[in-house]
Image: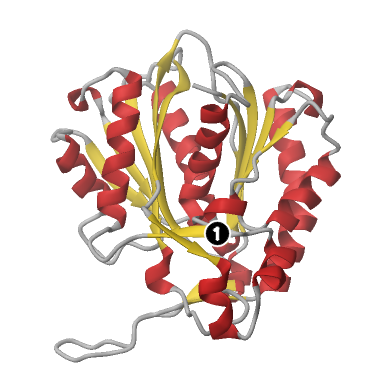
Amino acid sequence: MIKLPTPATSHHSAILSLGTYRPARVVKNEELAARIDSSDEWIRERTGITERRFGGPDETIVTMGFEAAKQALEQAEINASDIDVVIVATFTHRYQTPSAAAEIAALIGANEASAFDIGAACAGFTYGIGIADALIRAGSASHVLLVGSEKISDFTNFDDRGTAFLFADGAGAAIIGQSDAQGIGPTVWGADGTAREAIIMEPDTVTAGQQGIPSLLTMEGQRVFRWAVGSMGEVCDRALAAAGVTPDDIKAFVPHQANLRITDALVKRLKFPESVVIARDVIVSGNTSSASIPLALDALRQSGAVTSGDPVLMVGFGAGLAFAAQVALVP
């Protein structure tokens, strides 16, 4: 029997940089409220959202992800040729194939990098961190470009009173690479496929050569709310324990920006001290699914609320019902 080489396991990984892209078009609640017989006050009360961004007709998850990726590369001070793997987390890529990751890799010039998409919806970015961390620590990659990019406005039913005002567009990217010390804690993740109907897009009703009805996102809002509030606190507890830290050690909490009420309920459940900064980017960005965590983390960094080396707890959760959480250090 042949003996295969044992992969190196002595590498450490860390988030080296962040990049973001927010579309120019700002959509206030009033623009959406009339169509669903609602109001700005009603939307704010239920979600905390005051505005969100929608991509233009020429913007796609590839173009937005490319802009975020360029920023991340510049901040990491590396070249595209240094990227070994490109991962894109998304559920709104309009093509079954090729992957958005392959397109973004080509646009940035990472022509020899492996590239693939992951479909973990709102948990996509934290899933991607877990994958990138494992690749680097195993010695399979030295630099991974992770992009979360969504154009959910293309799949939103603006006549649905439960979802019309929730979702938005944007992109965030991170370079995850080798580091002198471990900067990413163990990822706690999972999924409950028995609840697939809770958040779902049915297949498009399009056949070859014919026009059809594109799929729109549907969600059982109360069911998802109860699951997130009831289960994600324990997931966060497990991520903190896996990293060997307590809520008192955390500088910031960056949950998926789904709904401000979910964030506030998790903060109460986790009993963070007042010193912990809470990401509430959902107020001005809406729910951007896989892009929400990098957008929210970078907003905290840009405001000076967190600085390089600060430990943050991130948790993503959404359709699947998929979830992933980890503690990581701010780049």
Identify the image quadrant of residue 9: top left
Residue 222: percent from left, percent from top: 73, 72
What residue is drawn where x is 15% and y is 33%?
A: 112
For the question of whether residue 269 can be seen, the reply is yes
What residue is drawn where x is 14% and y is 88%?
A: 209
Q: Is residue 217 left or right of residue 259?
A: left
Q: Is residue 282 left or right of residue 253?
A: left
Residue 261: percent from left, percent from top: 75, 57
Identify the image quadrant of residue 240: top right
Colour mapping: secondary structure
* Label 1: element kind: strand
Q: Amino acid at mark 1?
A: Glu
Please identify the residue farthest to the top as the structure is shown.
180
Label 1 crowd bin: few (<14), some (14–19), many (20+), radius 10 Å: many
For the question of whether residue 3 can be seen, the reply is no
Front in this rendered view, residue 255 or 189: 255
Front in this rendered view, residue 17 or 238: 17
What residue is drawn where x is 63% and y is 70%?
A: 195
Front in this rendered view, residue 6 or 32: 32
Residue 20: percent from left, percent from top: 40, 39
What residue is drawn where x is 53% and y is 75%?
A: 32
Which quadrant is home to the N terminus?
top left
Residue 89: percent from left, percent from top: 40, 50
**Residue located beneath label 1 in the image:** 51
